Image: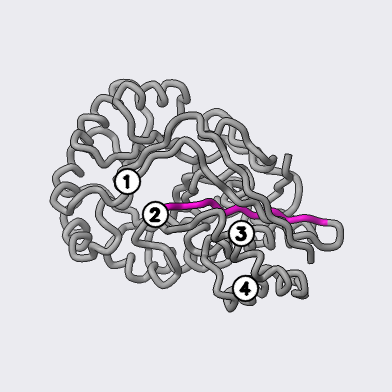
Amino acid sequence: MQLKFKKYTLPLKHTFSISRESHDFQDTLIVSLSLDGKSGFGETTSNPYYKITMESLSDEIEAVRGDIENFRFEKPEAFHQFLSQKNLSNFALCALDLAAHDLYGKLLGKPLYEIWGTTIDHYPITNYTIGIASIEKMRSKMQETPWPIYKIKLGTEDDVAIVRELRKHTSAVFRVDANCAWTAEETIENAPLLKDLGVEFLEQPLKADDWAGMEKVMHKSVLPVIADESCIVEADVEKCGLHFNGINIKLTKCGGLTPALRMIQKSKELGLKTMVGCMTESTVGISAIAQLLPQLDYVDMDGPLLIKEDIADGIQILEGGKLIFPELGGSGVTLR
């Protein structure tokens, strides 16, 4: 099996700001695995919050090049188990696992959702994310891209006022993501006001390790709460079941599709709502997320809508959220 990887810098259409950071570009690493004339592609992004850089990712993957190229590839699950013993970060593991799944499906000539026994007759629509900015800019972004569901990033001193103003300009469903910026008291106080403004749920309002605060929120919030930063890997799902109404799985953070599938299954067993989110990936990573759609309640896969120029073809997100799935097997990715 042949391994290649390359760094790309994706310029964003707008400055993307959340409660703890802002950026105008997203660095991403694309990995390809080739075998028997087929190539599978995977993706992972840099992330300052988790101390992941392009250099660290490249060094990790280069260090196991020989092991990967000598591996007898048959199924992605076995490949993931093999890589799990190589001291890789989950971000690096994700790119390799996504590439392995894409390759596997292409070798079989079937999309992953079909291999997993699901159909695309019904699937959730992705939200479109509005990052923190002035109310005028947030409203402008929303009007620039009319969408049925918006995720509103919050974590300011005027959060409810922002949502109240945005509500004047659309009847779309709102979701609110505070990215750990609120306290339990703020969350409980804000929830009924936001519910009246058409907010569907709150995502990660408290700091990731504030379990005592989340216990208060679970008992008193009138809106459902979805875990993000509190739910990184498989072991986190069960604990989140006691403190949240649902989980947001990020492929980069958990280590790819292989663990994500197990997290989805565990989430359903616990009666949690299940969401998969993105980290502003290109169509490479988003096409992998799309294969999971039949198994999800919610999805945040708007990465290709937020970047100025894509680097790949695969899943197509049309106006209003309708999707065109690629005809290739696997995730259906081809690089431009």
Q: Nearer the viewer, residue 244 or 72?
A: 72
Quadrant of the image containing the C terminus: top right
Q: Using the numbered discs, state the Cα–Cα distance from disc 2 to disc 3 in whole angstroms.
A: 18 Å
Q: Residue under label 4, please give it.
A: 83
Q: Residue under label 2, please give it.
A: 49
Q: Residue under label 1, please give it.
A: 20
Above or below, 236 relative to 218: below
Say what amino acid the circle numbered 3 marks.
Ser
Dominant secondary structure (helix, strand or loop) of the stretch shown in magenta: strand
Disc nearest the viewer among 4 and 2:
2
Say what amino acid the circle numbered 4 marks.
Leu
| Quadrant of the image occupied by residue 158 | top left
Question: Magenta stretch?
Answer: 38-48
Of the residues under marks 4 and 2, which one precedes in the sequence? 2
**Residue 124, percent from left and from top:** 50, 44
Task: Identify the residue at horizontal 69%, vertical 53% (top origin).
Answer: 41
Of the residues under marks 1 and 4, which one precedes in the sequence? 1
Task: Identify the residue at horizontal 71%, vertical 43% (top origin).
Answer: 326
> Could you tell me if the residues under marks 2 and 1 are in contact, i.e. CB atoms within 8 Å?
yes
**Residue 139, percent from left and from top:** 35, 23
